[in-house]
Amino acid sequence: MSGAVRVAGVRRGPARSRREATDRVGDGVLRGLCFLAALLAILAIVAIAYQVIHRASPAVSRFGAGFLAHSIWQPNFGVAGEGTFGAAAFLYGTAVTSFATMLLALPIGVSIGLYLSMLAPLRLRGVIGPLVEMLAAIPSVILGFWGILVLGPFLQAHVEPFLHRALGFLPVFGGPATTGAGLFNATLILTIMVVPIVASISRDLFLTVPQELQDGATALGATRWEVVRGIVIPSAASGVVAAAFLGLGRALGEAIAVTQVIGAGNSIHGSLFQTGDTLASRIADQYQGATTKTLVASLFYLALILLAIELVVNVAAQLIARRFDVRSAVSI
Amino acid sequence: MTGAFHPPAGMGEPPGPAAQMDDPFGGEARLAPERPTGPNLPGMDPGAALGPLARSDHLRRRQLVSRLVGAAQTAAALLAVAVLATVVYSVASRAVSVLSFDFLTQNLPAPPSGLASTSAPGGGIAPAIVGTALLMAMATAIAMPAGILVALYLTEFAGPRSRPAIRLALDLLNGLPTIIVGLFVFGLLVVGHHETGFAGAFALSIVMLPLIARATQEVLLLVPASLRQAADALGVSHWRTVLGVVLPAARGGILTATVLAVARAAGETAPLIFTCALFGTSVSVNPFGHLALPNIPVYIFTASEAADPNGFARAWGAAFVLLAFILLTNLGVRTLARGRSTSLR
């Protein structure tokens, strides 16, 4: 373009004003669309909460807070066949599986994070890191399918009898169950899901610990583990806590794989080898039988409890992560 | 270990700089107060001063602990890789018996009916493959523009007060159990109507939206400010800058984010079991039809809930197809992203 054209453009010719008008409209439209999309993202959260509360309200008014204390789940109970429902067994199952999962996944995940950030040779890091993240990419339905057909029989035949023999004095390691399905299997499957989350976040955290601090400790004669224990972990502790909360959120909310391997039990057992159910897995379990209104409302009641727990856990994770400037989104 | 621990004849001279750098424990041994000093105290004999540099039991124990912990960390990493290998091998070895051209092109067999507890062997999963592809296409068509627009709002327009709120909403959406997303869409679109492919795709798009939005936002932040400034200097309006400069510069990263979100959502089952689980046995391409779209995740899920060996066999095959797609997609995206020299992952 020659300069003459531009100079002509500076004078407010008709083409110029037309383009200005287009630009005004274009700017407005783009801004409006973006704003709308952002608003929709916020509205989605509100709509989900509203929908869950709204659909749960029949069950809430019918069972009240007693829903949390009863462990009877009988869709065909009563004269009208409306059923009676209680969530106590599922609350227990959720608490036990999530707690046991974190007990396993936190040390394993942090260990992998330490290995990938400090110990592994550079060439191995580029291989093992992506492989660990691949573990998180396995769909839960495939992991659950594997859990019930491959892991379950193995646990039943080998691991559960062994644990019972060795640690049977603890009530959590009761006699082996008739099938491999149960809280223990669910815990292991959940651990497989949570470990990559904790591992990849904690690796990223450990990589941000200033090298000077570590070098200083090393120069003072600290061994590698003392550097980790005294410098690396304390520097990244809050981030590791945030990672643990994110992993916990995953463990609490996983429905499909858990429902496949936990055995859909209705009662509370002390032993990990018995069947049980979590809030999320019971919802998934009823996907075909959701016929009566009370049952559907009760499922939404379960979802409401789960939603409340998840909101607390997630907000806690975000607050910790924000305060300490941790990257909160796991890139998997 | 270097000679610092076993001083040669010329003991009086201090260890060289190389020895100090290679072996931090030399310093430690000198500093450790509780080491046994022996009869030759420092100062008595310049030659014996280095005697205590021999590793004490205390130091040896600390190094042993360090090494054991390191071994445990290595073992944890190997365990994770071993689990991945075991799962992939289990799926692949069990899928071999059913995988064939027919398996990929034939209709689903009829479910066991009447007194029979097992379905007929054979049959394929073509309807589920077509259905999953359609679901992903629809979900992407909803989630990708929405996700990009949200990301643009965050980077281009949002003020300091609205930005944290939107980011929190995205993080909460991301952390929401997908079963709740499924129930939400069930209450919104299915109750009073019937399960449809569209309902399933809508649920999947809610799962994909935060993934695409957050990843796109990070890519947009990486677009060099100089590009934007150049456009501003030329008097280009905001929307032309965004459409003509910013988005093209971030194109690769946005595509990567979308593909990863598709790979994640393709295996999601929980959003579908209440919205897109009642389907027929033949290929369907109508997202609003009376029967929902068949899809691979729900097919595997229902097969795993029934005690039907032939169903199990087909489910392993379907699992292999799905797993291969997801793992290869992840692998491909990572390789491509690493291959590109720009930082716009």
Image (cartoon, rainbow, N blue to C red):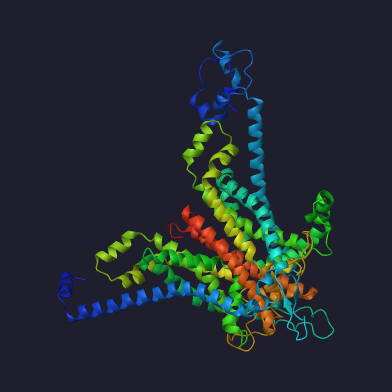
Could you tell me which residue is drawn at 78 percent across and 55 percent down? A172
Q: Quadrant of the C terminus of chain A?
A: bottom right
Could you tell me which residue is drawn at 60 percent across and 67 percent down? B326
Judge left or right: residue B204 versus residue B115.
Answer: left
In the image, residue A294 sits, relative to residue B12, either above or below, namely below
**Where is residue A142 shown, x and y percent of the image?**
68, 67
**Where is residue B246 shown, x and y percent of the image?**
36, 66
In the image, residue A70 sits, relative to residue A98, either above or below, namely below
Do we see residue B98 in this rendering?
no
> Toward the viewer: A234 or B276?
A234
**Where is residue B282 shown, x and y percent of the image?**
67, 85
Could you tell me which residue is drawn at 73 percent across and 83 percent down? A82
Q: How many marks?
A: 0
Could you tell me which residue is drawn at 23 percent across and 81 percent down? A18
**Where is residue B336 shown, x and y percent of the image?**
51, 61
> Toward the viewer: A74 or B241?
A74
Do we see residue A254 in this rendering?
yes
Judge left or right: residue A231 versus residue A91.
Answer: left
Judge left or right: residue A25 versus residue B114.
Answer: left
Q: Quadrant of residue B25?
A: top right
